[in-house]
Image: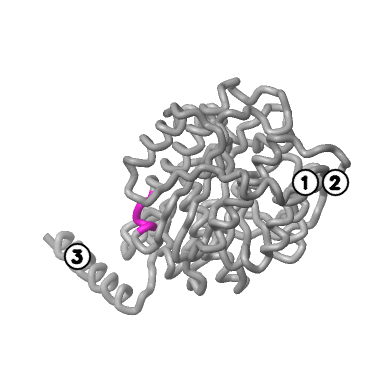
Amino acid sequence: MKKQKQTLKSNLFKKIFIKICRLFDYEIIDQNQLYLPLSRKTINQNLSKQGEESLVIPMGRIKIKRPVKSLDIILRTCASVNMLTQSKKRIFGSSKGEYSLRTLKSIINSINNNKDIFKKIKLKLTIIDHNSSKQILDKFKNILNKQFFKSEIKKLNIDNYKKQIKEYNQQGNKVSSNQISNMSNIHQSLDLAKNCEDLIYFVEDDYLHKTNSIEEMIFAYEKISSQINDEIILCPADYPYLYNKSNNTKIFLGQFYHWRSVDESLCTFLTSSKMIKKYWKKYTSACKFEHYPFEKPFHDIYKRELCLSPMPAIAVHYTNVNSIYGLSPFIDYKTIWNKNKY
């Protein structure tokens, strides 16, 4: 009987203590269970509050000074071209349309993995397509029509842009028709991004995403940009070629991943409309003249602004297995591939 009274008193004290902690906006941790009674979550769950605070155990809270207002995802597709500049086969040897479909499916699976974060964030997904078959486009529409967010499929208006592209590239070679369509698609994406409210995620149609990739990018962007009081660029792939150099780097904590500063990327990245407007001439220069490497204007921006890549990758470039610009290290490629089957 005495034990029961002590237990009741203990439980009553805990309840009162928890209420007081909530009142003063404190957080407590039950070390035996690794449980946070105020948040009603375990420590391996997302403890942050979008737009308000970042909380990573044991680092404590960071108040968010730079909340994300909206996210526009711009997916550039061209299911008719297998490889832009190569004739090699991709990992798993499927048609390009299969990679395009699985890329879209992986992005949507990642969005739906945590719908709660989009209660405060406006979300739209736009596909800018060039020469994909009607069958592929119908499948795009079928996938998008079932979602809770706004979406749109636009046709690449190549005639608007190809006249601005110089005929010969930096190496003195004639620019290929595939590269002209690629540069035009990037240009049209940038034109669209210029009028977006906040974050824009530019993504190519051969990047398959982990289920927590969109969530991680939103929370990492809020946290890190609040820490440094500036806009940033996030590249979700962890490219193997960046490990061939011994450059100095900066390491930041995201929500579930480490992010390191990099000085190079390909053309899949997330940033803000403010950054696009600030470096408009630099970004669009990649659409008018084929540099070597192609992304050189982006790399020039990274000399001034912080570009970060996760370790390991949260989105994987599904290209040829021997490409140093492709498959990120330490990834279960088969599992991600199978999860995003159309």
Q: Which residue is mark 1?
A: 290
Spatial separation of the CA atoms under disc 3 and disc 1: 76 Å
Q: Which mark is residue 170?
A: 2
- 196 with respect to 234 (left or right): left
Q: How is the image coloured?
A: one colour
Instruction: Give the residue type that dot 1 points to.
Output: Glu
- 16 with respect to 277 (left or right): left
Read off the magenta span. Answer: 114-118
Residue 130, compared with residue 279, is above or below; it is above
Instruction: Give the residue type that dot 3 points to.
Output: Gln
Spatial separation of the CA atoms under disc 3 and disc 2: 80 Å
Asked if the residue at tag 1 contacts the one at tag 2, i.e. Cβ–Cβ closer than 8 Å, the answer is yes
* Whole-percent x, y for residue 95 in the image: 56, 23
Spatial separation of the CA atoms under disc 2 and disc 1: 6 Å
Instruction: Give the residue type that dot 2 points to.
Output: Gln
Q: Which mark is residue 6?
A: 3
* Whole-percent x, y for residue 204 in the image: 59, 42
